[in-house]
Structures are given as C-alpha cells and as structure tokens.
C-alpha cells in the first residue's frame, strides 16, 4: 500500500453557528507528507476545522485546496480523504475485514483485488488474524487499528484523525503513537490530527498548530513552539511555564531552564523563595518555590546537589535571560501577571521572608 | 423498605389468575371436548374449507399489514429522526393520532372516506381522475387500509428511535469512504435499523392476527379473520368447541410470535417508551446538511402522514353536515346530529353505561397495577421475569379470546349485562398499561431518596406516602389515562359482556356502523374525539406542571 501525500492549503476560512463564530479567519499551509497536529482545548474550533476539510460541514467563507484544487464542489464521498473518528465509528454490523473492504467496494473494485488489499491493510496494522472478528469482539486498541486500516486502504492523499487516541488508556496510547509515526514515515500520507493532548501533539507532529477561540494562535515545528512560544497561552498550553520579567518585557521560562542553589548564584537574574514542595519525577525533581508574588516552578536534575533541597528551606533560584522567551503583549491585550524578579541589576534578597 | 413490598404483587396475580388465566385456559380446554378428550374440533377446522380458507386469509392479511406498515414507516421514521426537536414533537404527535383515536371513530371515519359514495370517490370522480367510483372498502384494500393505519405507529416509533440512535460518525465514515445514498441506505441504514423493524413488525403481526373490529366493519365476506369466526361460532352457531379450537390456533400463533420477540429482543423492548425529544439530536444535526435525502424522504412521507391523520380531519366536518347520506363536502352545516345524540335516550344510556364502567375499571386497574408495579420492583430478578410475563400477557392475547373466556366464566355467575362484569374485563385489559407506566417511573425514582427519608427518621409508610408516591404519581396518572381510554374504547368485550340495556357507547356505534351509518354516529365520533383530546391534554398539562419554569 502506498499513498502519495497531498499538500493542503486553507485560505481565510470562517464558520459560525447561529451568529457565534467558531472559526475566525483560518489560513494554513500544510506541505505534502506533513504530520500536522491541531492542538487546542475543547471549543477551540479544531474539530470544526477538521469537519470542514472532510466536508461534513461547509465553510461560511474561505477556500480549502488539496493539491492546489478547491474541494468545495467535491462531495464528501468523492474527496478520497481518509478519516479516523474519535470513537472509531466502525460499522457494528460488519466484521473487521468487511469494514476495511467497504471503501474499496464503494470504488467498484474487483473481489480479488479487494481481498488482497484488505489483507495488506490488516497486515499493516498487525491485525491479520482478526479479519473475521466483529468490532465488539475487538479491544479498543484493535478497533483503533481497524479504523486506521479502513482509512488507509483507500490510499488517501490526506488522512484526517479526530482525537483518534482519546478513547484509549495511556499505555495503549503510547504504543499506538509509535505505530502511527512508523506508518506515517512509511506511507508518506499527509496527516491532520486533532488532539487536546499537548504531549501527544509534541511527540507526533512535524507541524504543530495551536488553536484558541477559533483562531490559530501559533504554528510551527513543535520544538520551536515549545521553546519560543509567541504568547502566554501557547507557553502555558505546551507544558509548565513560569512568567518572568526581563527588563521591561515579560518572558516565558520553562521550569527546566531554572537553576537552583549554588548554580544559580552566578546568574544575572535571581530570586529568593521558600521551598514549598519537592516532587521526585525520576530523572528530575520538581521544586515549587513560593514567596509573596506567588509560585515558581523549577525542574532540576535529581543529583547529589538537589537531594539536599527540602521543603521549608529558603533557597535562591536564577535563570539566564537568554533562556526566557519574550512574549508579545498578553493575548488579546489581557493583563499578564509576572514574577517581580530581583535581577542582578537591581538588588537580590528582597523576597526573603 | 426492601423486601417488605414484594407481597404487593399478590393481589394483581390473584386477580389475573382468576379473571384472565383461568377463563382463557378453560376456553382452551373446551376445544378438546366438554365430555372426554376429542380432537374432533380440530379435525373439523382442517376439513371444512371455509375454516381452512379463513386461517390462510388471516395470516395473509396479517402478513400484508405487517409489510405495508414497514414500507410506509421507513421514510417517515427517517424524517422524524432527522427533524428539529420541535418538528419532531409535532410529527410524533401526528403519528400517535391513530393510537389515541377510538377504534370505532377511526373505522367510521374510514368508511365515510372510502365507501362507494364516500369522500375519496367523490373527489376522484369529481376531478375526472376516475369515471366510476371504485370499491375501496368491504374488500381486501379496506381491511389493509384500516389495519395498517392503526398498527403502523408500532413500527414508526421504534424505527425512529433506531434512526436517532445511529452514530452520525458511522454515516460520515461511510460517506468518507465513498458511499452514495443507495449504498448508505443498503449498507448502513437498513442493517442498523433492522432490529427495530423486526421488533415493530413482530408487534404488528401479533396484533393483526387477532384483529376483530376492522375486518368486521371494513372487510367483505372474503376477508373473514379468525376472531370473527370465533365470534360467529359462539353468537350464531353456539358451537363452543369449535370456537375454542379456533381460539387455540389464534393464541398459539400469537404466542409463537411473542416468544420469538421475547427471545430476540426481550420484554424490555416491548416496554420501552417512545423516543424522548430534546436530548441527543446529533443524528438530526448531522442529517440536516443532506437536503437531498431529507427532501426525498419528506416527499415520500407526506402522503403517509396524510394517511395517518385523514380520519381525524374529516370527523368534525362530517358531524356538521346536514345530509343523512353523509355526502362530502357537507352542503349545509348543522348541529342536528349533536342535538339528536343528546336527545335520544339510547345514546345517553350508552354514554352513561360507558362512563360507569370506566369509573369502576379505572380505579381498580390503577390500584392493582400500582401495587403490582411496586411489588414487581422489589422482587428478585428471576421471579420478576415470570411475573412480568404474566402481567404483559393481557396485552398480547387477542381481546376476542379474553372476551369469550370471560363470557364463559361470567354467564353462570349472572354477571353478563352487569357493569361490574364488563369493568372486571376492562381491568384485565388495562392493568398491564398501569403496571408498565408505574414501573417506568419507579425505575426513574432514585432509591437513595427513600433511604434518605428513612435516615431522617421516617417510617416506611411515611416514606412511601411523602417521598415515593409523589415520585411515581406521574406514572400512575399516565396509567390511569391509558386505562380510561382502553375501557372507553373497547368493543370486543362489550359485545359479549353487555346486553341491550347495558351496552356501551362503542358497542352501540359498532352496531350502527355494521348496518347502515346513522349520522348521529358522526356526532358521537366527534364528541369521543374531543373527550379523548381533553383527557390527553389534561394528562399532558398535569405531567408538565413541574417542568414549567416559574414565571
């Protein structure tokens, strides 16, 4: 089975339900063969966007181009888009193999070709032995694979996935993530993947699109977004983040960039606080400092030095301003609260209590 | 509280054992001879051609009615499921019209519509579409029209619920994989709704096999069905043995379908309530985009809807027409038939007899049914299943068999012609409805509330009266309304258990319609329809009173 991924281009898409805008001026370019994750909280519009691309909803304005062609006039059943649904949407009255065969039958293929391709597709997801099982006789993970095989067997140029791992438990999810990456690398299909799980999005995607309230807040490579979030929303959505003052601006600082104790002493930006909590996370310790300005989170390596950190201690923390990403003014002009940091230029120790 | 109420099912069981199970069993025993065992009656059924023909005809009619019900229901059920909540409520109300309409009113209206000089023929000949009037009634089409009309809702309701239960993602998945309308219908909709179709069809077939009024009034001699033959053998031939043998055949056929239904779907399916409005409208939301298939289905179901409500539409205009020949449209409007209805003593007597019987049967059925439901609710599962089966049976067994059985039981006791006798019979017919509605509200009732009351120091009686009873009262009221309509609508039991003086309104109408339609019947039909609507309206308003937001 091979699929040639097709590029997807969204141009100024708008969609409103009964006057409430759900998607507001969405433009996006997804190159062929890209694994794109749409990340957002529920109500951010990510699922609606997926439905527009699939054709289950119609945009109020804007264009959707697949391989340069506007797909608005193409009915759903002729779009040749693979779709994996949140709850798999396997036909309950058909066996796994019949589910996979359905799309091929709709394309009027011969019986022999259908059976060969169904066999290949089930083999691809490691379910060769399970073709005769009914969906209810399969585990959640197996159902997920059948859904994937059913979507891929039609050799789509574009594969849409709506929280496809959301219904599965954590350990199963990680296994399937690996498998998904492997399949993507092998097939080269363009994937648009909707999720609200930031870890999943960071882990899987080449292109990460963060959405909020019907808009794209930021898009780019996962690492770029993690390290250089454009604003406070993206910063805190993609993992934990401290907000610090750097000069006159606000900076986002990941907890793992914070130094604690001796290693902080030489840094230009420092603060004092009382250790409120220390959590052992395996390779690292999560230390929560508190002073009158609030909480500050540091992720420090679990080594000899850090093992001395105890709750109740007064401690110094610091960071290199290079590690903090200066944010645009708060999202939608929202007021951003930051730590009043004692920087090297002013005076240390004002937070000691 | 627990276990202490299990005994409450006893009065109901004793009542049903004596007034239902016992008379039916005695009737069945009669088929094997009054003195010593013989199969002569069955041999006769097989030997005499008219019985053989009628048996075949009965099953043929039931099968045809089932097929037509399914065919007509399919597009309508889809439209209901795909409609907006408000429209859906209206459509469901329209579908239920034949359900609630008195059988006699309905049949009268159909006769007026379909007879030789009836409304349909006048319209068709008048518009030049037909040269000569066509016989729509007193033949096979007449029976099929009348029976499909009243039995169709049994398919529409579960089918609409099945459509609404389809996960829109399945439809989207099929479309995404390339399915067009036909593939979608054949590969997704039909298989997913098949269980509901089968369930509805089983109920339709079960009811149709035992039908009496519609074939008797709307069919011709060639459409004689089993229930009519039973009636004929008792009233005219006085051949109890043969009537009993026919009853056995009818009962066995009915129970076989019932057993099939019970095995495949379970009783719960039969007891399921109509699809709720409001929540879970996602199927409707998803289908809204598909204007093409919605319009196609709407075009198909518009005539079906018209078919469902046609009888109720003509009842009122006809009752105001001046011509005793019931011509349409009425040339002259008059209240003459209403006047005669209230002036003639036979109508007034029949009305008061009906009300008297209902006044006895409704409280009896409500009390027995409520106690029974409370008891049933607390029985262990394995007992409850059997009790449930016995309680549901009066809904399943054809009324003709109940009527003949009770006639045989009551005649020696001198209960024939007494309001009590008929009221006992109506209680048998109505009590399952009360049990079912109360049971449903008990299932909705949170048992923790009762525990809370007990925890606050209430005795079980106070807990019952102050906490449980208010919770299940809507179920009791709904059951009482069902009971009233069952009693007020019954013809078959009244045919056997009343005489000239004690006959009820439906029986009087039946006699009138069977001979020649007396125009007063149209006034009676209109009044019964109004009464039914008022009772339903009051019931509905009452059940919604808590829901209405405080102004």
Image (cartoon, coloured by chain):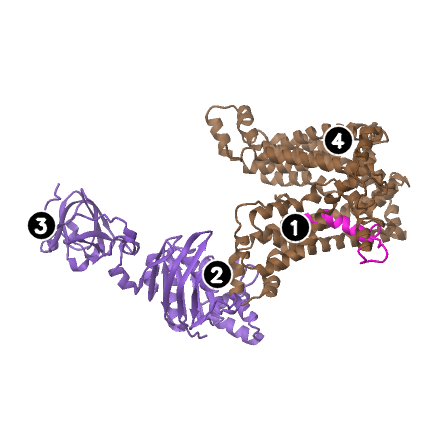
Chain colours: A purple, B brown
Residue B334: x percent and y percent?
A: 80, 36
Q: Residues within 10 Å of mark 3 (few under 14, many from 20)?
A: few
B405 left or right of A22 in image: right
Left or right, residue B516 beside residue A242: right
In magenta segment, residue B246? no
Q: Is residue B36 visible?
A: no
Residue A219 figure quarter: bottom left
Do marks 4 and 1 share a chain? Answer: yes
Q: Is residue A115 above or below residue B466?
A: below
To which residue does mark 3 refer? A346
At a point 84% along the width and 55% down the height, the residue shown is: B134
Label drawn at residue B156:
1
**Of the image marks 4 and 1, the number of the one nearer the N terminus:** 1
- Mark nearer the viewer, 3 or 4: 3
Q: Is residue A243 left or right of residue B78?
A: left
Q: How far apart are marks 4 and 2 (CA)?
A: 62 Å
Measured in 3D between alpha carbons, the distance from the residue under mark 2 to the one under mark 1, in whole angstroms, is: 32 Å
**Camera-side mark, 4 or 2:** 2
Whether callout 3 and callout 4 share a subunit is answered no
Residue holding disc 4: B424
Q: Which region is colored magenta?
A: B127-156
Residue B53 in picture, x, y percent from top left: 86, 53
Q: Which of marks 2 and 1 is in front?
A: 2
Whether pointer 3 and pointer 4 mark residues with C-beta atoms closer than 8 Å, the reply is: no
The quadrant of the picture occupied by the C terminus of chain A is top left
Residues at marks 4 and 1, CA–CA distance in whole angstroms: 32 Å
Disc 2 and disc 3: Cα gap in Å?
Answer: 57 Å
In this rendering, the label closer to the viewer, 2 or 3: 2
Please report whichever mark, 2 or 3, sits nearer to the chain's N-terminal start: 2
User: What chain letter is assigned to the residue under label 3?
Assistant: A
Which residue was labeled with disc 2? Answer: A58
Q: Does the magenta stretch include residue B149?
A: yes
């Amino acid at each position: 089975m091979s699929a040639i991924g097709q590029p997807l281009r969204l141009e100024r898409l708008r969609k409103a339900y009964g006057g409430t805008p759900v998607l507001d001026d969405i433009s996006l370019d997804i190159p062929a063969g890209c694994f794109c994750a749409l990340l957002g909280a529920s109500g951010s519009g990510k699922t609606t966007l997926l439905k527009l691309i699939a054709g289950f909803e119609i945009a109020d304005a804007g264009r959707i181009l697949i391989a340069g062609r506007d797909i608005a006039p193409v009915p759903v059943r002729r779009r040749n888009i693979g779709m994996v649904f949140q709850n798999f949407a396997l036909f309950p009255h058909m066996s796994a193999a019949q589910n996979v065969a359905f799309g091929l039958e709709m394309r009027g293929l011969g019986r022999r070709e259908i059976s060969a391709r169904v066999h290949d597709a089930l083999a691809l997801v490691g379910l060769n032995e399970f073709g005769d099982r009914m969906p209810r006789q399969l585990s959640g993970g197996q159902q997920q694979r059948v859904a994937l095989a059913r979507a891929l067997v039609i050799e789509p140029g574009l594969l849409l996935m709506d929280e496809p791992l959301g219904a599965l438990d954590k350990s199963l999810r990680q296994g399937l993530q690996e498998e998904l990456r492997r399949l993507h690398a092998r097939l080269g299909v363009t994937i648009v993947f909707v999720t609200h799980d930031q870890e999943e999005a960071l882990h899987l995607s080449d292109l990460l699109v963060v959405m909020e309230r019907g808009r794209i807040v930021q898009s780019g490579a996962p690492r770029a977004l993690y390290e250089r979030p454009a604003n406070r929303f993206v910063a805190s959505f993609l993992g934990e983040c401290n907000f610090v003052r750097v000069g006159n601006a606000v900076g986002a600082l990941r907890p793992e960039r914070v130094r604690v104790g001796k290693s902080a002493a030489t840094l230009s930006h420092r603060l004092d606080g009382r250790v409120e909590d220390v959590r052992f996370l395996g390779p690292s310790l999560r230390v929560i400092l508190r002073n009158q300005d609030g909480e500050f989170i540091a992720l420090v390596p679990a080594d000899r030095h850090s093992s001395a950190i105890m709750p109740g201690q007064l401690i110094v923390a610091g960071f290199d301003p290079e590690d903090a990403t200066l944010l645009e003014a708060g999202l939608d002009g929202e007021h951003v609260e930051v730590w009043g940091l004692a920087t090297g230029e002013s005076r240390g120790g004002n937070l000691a209590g | 509280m627990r276990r202490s109420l299990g005994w409450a099912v006893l009065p109901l069981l004793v009542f049903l054992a004596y007034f239902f199970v016992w008379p039916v069993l005695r009737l069945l025993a009669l088929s094997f001879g009054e003195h010593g065992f013989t199969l002569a009656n069955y041999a006769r059924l097989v030997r005499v051609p008219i019985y053989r023909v009628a048996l075949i005809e009965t099953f043929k009619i039931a099968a045809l009615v089932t097929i037509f019900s399914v065919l007509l229901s399919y597009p309508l059920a889809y439209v209901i499921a795909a409609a907006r909540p408000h429209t859906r409520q209206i459509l469901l109300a329209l579908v239920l019209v034949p359900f609630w309409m008195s059988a006699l009113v309905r049949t009268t209206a159909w006769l007026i519509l379909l007879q030789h000089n009836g409304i349909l023929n006048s319209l068709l000949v008048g518009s030049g579409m037909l040269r000569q009037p066509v016989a729509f009634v007193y033949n096979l089409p007449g029976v099929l029209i009348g029976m499909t009309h009243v039995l169709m809702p049994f398919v529409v309701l579960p089918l609409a619920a099945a459509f609404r239960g389809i996960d829109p993602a399945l439809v989207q998945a099929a479309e995404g994989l390339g399915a067009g309308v036909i593939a979608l219908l054949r590969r997704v909709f039909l298989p997913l709704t098949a269980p509901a179709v089968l369930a509805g069809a089983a109920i339709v077939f079960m009811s149709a096999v035992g039908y009496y009024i519609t074939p008797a009034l709307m069919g011709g001699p060639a459409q004689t069905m089993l229930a009519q033959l039973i009636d004929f053998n008792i009233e005219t031939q006085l051949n109890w043995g043969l009537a009993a043998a026919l009853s056995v055949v009818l009962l066995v056929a009915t129970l076989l379908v019932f057993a099939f239904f019970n095995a495949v779907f379970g009783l719960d399916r039969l007891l399921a309530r109509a699809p709720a409005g409001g929540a879970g409208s996602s199927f409707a939301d998803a289908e809204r985009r598909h204007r093409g298939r919605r319009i196609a289905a709407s075009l198909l179901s518009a005539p079906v809807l018209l078919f469902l409500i046609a009888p109720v539409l003509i009842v009122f205009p006809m009752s105001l027409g001046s011509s005793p020949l019931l011509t349409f449209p009425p040339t002259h409007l008059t209240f003459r038939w209403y006047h005669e209805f209230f002036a003639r003593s036979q109508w007034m007597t029949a009305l008061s007899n009906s009300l008297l019987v209902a006044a006895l049967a409704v409280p009896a059925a409500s009390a027995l049914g409520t106690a029974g439901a409370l008891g049933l609710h607390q029985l262990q599962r394995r007992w409850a299943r059997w009790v449930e089966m016995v309680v549901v049976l009066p809904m399943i067994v054809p009324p003709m068999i109940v009527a003949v059985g009770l006639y045989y039981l009551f005649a020696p006791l001198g209960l024939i012609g007494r309001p009590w006798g008929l009221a006992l019979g109506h209680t048998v017919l109505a009590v399952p409805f009360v049990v079912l509605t109360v049971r449903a509200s008990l299932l909705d009732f949170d048992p923790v509330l009762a525990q809370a009351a007990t925890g606050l120091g209430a005795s079980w009686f106070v807990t019952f009266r102050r906490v449980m009873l208010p919770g299940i009262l809507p179920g009791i009221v709904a059951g009482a309304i069902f009971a009233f309509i069952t009693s007020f609508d019954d013809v078959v039991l009244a045919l056997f258990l009343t005489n000239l003086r004690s006959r009820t309104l439906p029986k009087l109408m039946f006699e009138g319609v069977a001979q020649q339609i007396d125009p007063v019947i149209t006034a009676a039909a209109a009044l019964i329809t109004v009464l039914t609507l008022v009772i339903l309206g009051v019931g509905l308003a009452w059940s919604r009173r808590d829901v209405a937001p405080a102004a």
